[in-house]
Image: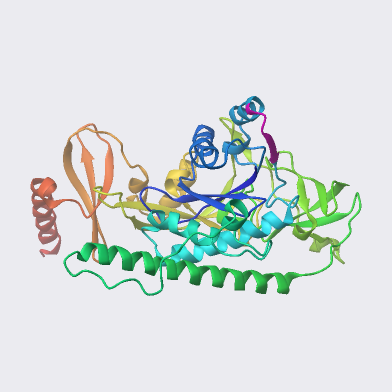
Amino acid sequence: MHISVDMVTGLPDSNGHDALLVIVDRFSKAIILVPCNIELSAEGWARILRDHVYTRHGMLQVVISDRGPQFVSTFMKELYRMLDITQNASMAFHPQTDGQTERVNQEVEKYLRIFINYHQDDWADWLPLAEFAHNNRAHSATGRSPFMILYGRNPRIIPDSPRPPNSKVPAASDFSKTMAQIHKETETALEEAAGRMKAQYDKHKRPAREYHPRDKVWLDATNLHLPRPKKKLDDKRVGPFLILEKTGAAAYKLKLPPHWKIHPRFNEKLLSPFIAPTFLNQEQPPPPPPDLIDGEEEWEIEQILDSKTRKVRGKRGQPSTAVVDYFIKWAGHTREHNSWVTASEMGNAQEAIAEYEEKMGSNERVAVVKIATSKSPLAMVLNHHFDGEDISYLCQREDGTQKWVLNPDVTKFENFLVEYWSNYESHSIQRTEP
């Protein structure tokens, strides 16, 4: 069995899952859907192969994946070797070695995102039915359903006109209605995904462009994970880069910056020719490389331009917290690269934060950054801040650490809040007396 695997990310949390593995059989186009987390480890991927693939279809022959750490780790390479499985880590962005499988992957992802829009919170519960609907539908690449190719038949589905429900067992009726509704939604999502794929294909269909070694090209960076200050900061295209060689029918190897830890092979659809500027001053100098701090790449902050405080909803049973974001101007980058960065991601930028807060004439936001993890008992409430209907209190513990607490549980803070507001009101009266 030859499979390809893609991880769909950016999904709403469902039963603790925020990502989805889509496993596609290259022969039948059958899919296996497994909810997971974006931090999936190599051992976790190995267990998924064992529990969801091997138990259904036996031992694999080939696995096609991207170059995510869970797929190309030393652990997985050794496991594949021991089990006689061929690993084919695709070129950056999408595997173009098998265009048909890639088309299946794209259509499946569109289908799942449409389906998940129906079920923002409980999509993980309905994945088995979403998988069933896809595998029971004739695919454009084969003309037959994956079930028909694998088993020689299509399974029975929910009847359009089920028998009348028994009023004495309402739970069974509700269960049946829910299944029918999910079945209808999966069919709708499949139709919509197929329509979107056709429209996209018709819009972008063009003959392949030919490049040669030493040509300069722009690289489409929309779907690349580049070492930038912030993921959302990625340019639509980056470069220009020198073509080193042609490595396939429509793939090229580029000369990338050495600190970019991505594979240098790209399909020609991600490349566009570089046209030299008419005047030398039109060409922008390349941004400086990142600093290496404790082995991690960090980008230099030229200036903090703005800041804002926002509320972050806590996990189940946990209170909301206040988080500070800073709007950053990055050294050597144009203003289009300015981006918001959470304070917790700026561990080595305390000097820049202090300069900004001093310029703003307020230490309030700096205090928010210093979120204490101490378990020392609460000693006093120092300050407060209103944001619409929300209120945050700056609390100090007995060990001296401070933390802003958003909408605290009054029963736990009652004595401290009474003392704080009593002192606050008395100070206010003193300030207003002639």
Residue 306 in the image, given as x and y percentages of width and height: 46, 59
Q: Is residue 123 above or below residue 7?
A: below
Q: How is the image coloured?
A: rainbow
* Chain part drawn in magenta: 83-88
Of 6 and 213, nearer the camera is 6
Q: Is residue 260 magenta?
A: no
Q: Is residue 146 toward the left or the right of residue 218 in the image?
A: left
Give x and y (percent) for residue 132: 49, 58
Quadrant (top left, top right, bottom left, bottom right) of the C terminus: bottom left
Image point (65%, 52%), residue name: 224
In this rendered view, identify the residue nearer to me: 211 or 379: 211
Quadrant containing the N terminus in the rendered view: top right
168 relative to 128 in the view: left or right: left
Residue 302 rendering spot, x and y as whole percentages: 58, 50
Viewer can see residue 220: no
- Quarter where residue 63 is shown: top right
Image coordinates of residue 431 in percent, x first then y, are 15, 60
Examine the rendered structure and indicate whether residue 281 appears above or below residue 230: below
Q: Is residue 211 visible?
A: yes
